[in-house]
Image (cartoon, rainbow, N blue to C red):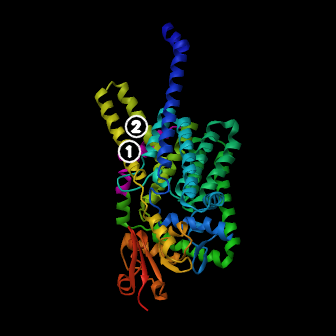
């Protein structure tokens, strides 16, 4: 016993603690370097820009050039779609980047990379506080390796102007403050207020977060009241109340900006979108969603969430703080299974699920080591390495495979097409790469067109070619939705230039 005490409190203990700190700093630095390389290499060209990103970029571009917070097409401003799909927490920083560095894809994507760095730091600190630095390092690695064979993960989303990564960044900051409010009772009030503000910014950033974050906070408050009894009324009430208030303020701003009629029209279109993609209840869509989920983290996501719920069974402040991200992920995936099944809908839950998945892997290794099952430890380590390295290799292939087609088409348009000529297209990303006068397919056709592709049914009819636009620019999204009748294109237009997957046509018929 005396020898154990001398080791536990003597120089060897200090050396051991110093060694652990050194290991943590080294691993954290390596992870930071990996994240920076994955986030910045070939930034404007990989992944290739596309419909959603281009649509979002219209708002900050229009704000900088015309002083109007809106989407834009050749007929004028449009106030639905990207103006409410992604909040000012994304649009305004991108507009500031445009103001400082000019309108460009690189400037905009740097803003989202900064948000990705914020999300990763918050994830690491939250995991370290709850589980220690080894689990934190593994959770961060899993998040970086969150893509599957066919679908994007954190790095890919963090390199595009979308709302998911900024939203999860604010959500993780909220969970960080929420856990601090539970675990540090003396500062519960201040941390509860910060948590509510961060959650509110997440709701403003991506309005779909309202579906999950607010019910999760309400359920956590109820569970704490009747089961855990581990926190204060500040923790139970302040975060959801402040979050809802923030979203309410943004709703009032939109009501003032759009006016009653415009706001009502936006609300009706949002309900249409909800029916078309957010609440679908289609067996095939649910099956598709389930197939995606069992691939995430090499199959560790679902077992990790189950294990996370089991670890939350004890009545303690730690269990309540641990439950918060796990419960949000579970509720998120429950909604995902009744949605259209786009993997992007599950992205926040996938990132939050990295925490219990890493905890499960860590605890399994500890149990196997304690039982001296060396063979199983090595097999588990090999599998975990595969779970991390295979998705990272896929992500690295995306990052190291720049695609220049959009920029090549933009260069051709700048050289050969007058900026005053109307170009009919459904490729909004081109509006950021050139200053031409584009006419875009009406926003209200987006959800029916995508729903047709995913679920079948009658195709969407669009009469945009009846206006006889002098140019038509085809690309990945118009090809995906088949919005333009191929017989009309073949009859009335001829190909001018192709940069796959983009094709520029000029009207040849009188």
Q: Which mark is residue 361?
A: 2
Residue 228 in the figure: left or right of residue 484: right
Density class for disc 2 (Cα within 10 Å; few <14, some 14-19, many ≥20) is some
Circles 1 and 2, Cβ within 8 Å, touching? The answer is: yes
The answer for how far apart the CA atoms under marks 1 and 2 are is 8 Å
In this figure, which residue is indicated by the disc labeled 1?
300
Q: Is residue 345 shown above or below 185? A: below
Magenta segment, prevailing SS (helix, strand or loop): helix
Give the image location of residue 149, x and y in percent: 35, 53
**Placement of the C terminus among the 4 image quadrants:** bottom left
Examine the rendering and report whether any part of residue 313 can be seen. no
Residue at the spot 51% in from the left edge and 25% down from the top edge: 20
Which stretch is magenta? 290-314
Give the image location of residue 235, x and y in percent: 65, 45
Q: Is residue 282 shown above or below 354? A: below
Q: Which mark is residue 492?
A: none
Q: Earlier in the sequence, mark 1 or mark 2?
A: 1
Density class for disc 1 (Cα within 10 Å; few <14, some 14-19, many ≥20) is many
Which one is nearer the viewer's eye here, 115 or 238?
115
In what element is the residue under mark 1?
loop
Q: How many marks?
A: 2
Which one is nearer the viewer's eye here, 162 or 168?
162
Residue 249 in the figure: left or right of residue 378: right
């Amino acid at each position: 016993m005396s020898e154990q005490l001398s080791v536990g409190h003597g120089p060897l203990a200090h050396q051991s603690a110093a060694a652990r700190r050194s290991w943590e700093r080294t691993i954290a630095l390596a992870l930071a370097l990996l994240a920076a390389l994955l986030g910045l290499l070939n930034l404007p060209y990989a992944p290739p820009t596309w419909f959603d990103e281009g649509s979002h970029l219209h708002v900050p571009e229009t704000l900088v050039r015309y002083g109007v917070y809106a989407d834009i097409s050749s007929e004028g401003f449009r106030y639905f779609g990207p103006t409410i799909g992604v909040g000012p927490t994304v649009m305004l920083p991108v507009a500031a980047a445009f103001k400082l560095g000019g309108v460009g894809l690189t400037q905009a994507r740097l803003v989202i990379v900064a948000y990705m760095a914020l999300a990763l730091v918050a994830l690491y600190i939250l995991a370290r506080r709850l589980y220690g630095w080894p689990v934190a390092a593994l959770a961060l690695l899993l998040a970086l390796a969150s893509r599957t064979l066919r679908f994007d993960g954190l790095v890919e989303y963090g390199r595009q102007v979308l709302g998911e990564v900024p939203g999860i960044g604010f959500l993780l900051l909220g969970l960080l403050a929420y856990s601090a409010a539970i675990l540090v009772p003396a500062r519960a009030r201040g941390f509860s207020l910060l948590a509510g503000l961060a959650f509110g910014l997440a709701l403003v950033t991506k309005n779909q977060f309202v579906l999950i974050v607010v019910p999760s906070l309400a359920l956590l408050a109820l569970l704490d009241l009747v089961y855990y009894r581990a926190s204060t009324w500040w923790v139970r009430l302040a975060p959801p109340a402040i979050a809802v208030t923030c979203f309410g303020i943004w709703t009032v701003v939109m009501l003032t900006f759009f006016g009653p009629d415009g706001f009502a029209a936006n609300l009706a279109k949002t309900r249409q979108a909800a029916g078309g993609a957010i609440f679908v209840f289609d067996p095939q869509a649910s099956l598709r969603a389930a197939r995606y989920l069992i691939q995430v983290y090499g199959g560790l996501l679902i077992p990790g969430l189950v294990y996370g719920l089991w670890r939350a069974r004890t009545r303690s402040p730690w269990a309540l703080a641990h439950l918060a991200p796990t419960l949000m992920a579970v509720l998120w995936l429950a909604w995902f299974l009744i949605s259209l099944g786009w993997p992007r809908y599950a992205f926040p839950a996938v990132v939050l699920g990295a925490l219990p998945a890493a905890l499960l892997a860590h605890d399994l290794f500890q149990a196997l080591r304690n039982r001296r099952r060396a063979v199983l430890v090595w097999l588990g380590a090999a599998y975990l390495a595969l779970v991390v390295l295979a998705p990272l290799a896929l992500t690295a292939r995306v990052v190291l495979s720049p695609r220049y087609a959009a920029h090549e088409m933009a260069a051709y348009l700048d050289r050969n097409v007058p900026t005053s000529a109307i170009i009919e297209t459904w490729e909004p990303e081109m509006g950021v790469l050139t200053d031409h006068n584009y006419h875009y397919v009406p926003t209200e056709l987006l959800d029916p067109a995508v729903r047709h592709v995913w679920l079948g049914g009658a195709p969407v009819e669009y009469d945009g070619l009846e206006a006889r636009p002098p140019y038509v620019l085809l690309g990945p999204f118009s090809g995906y939705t088949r919005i333009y009748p191929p017989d009309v294109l073949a009859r009335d237009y001829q190909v001018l230039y192709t940069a796959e997957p983009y094709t520029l046509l000029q009207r040849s018929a009188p």
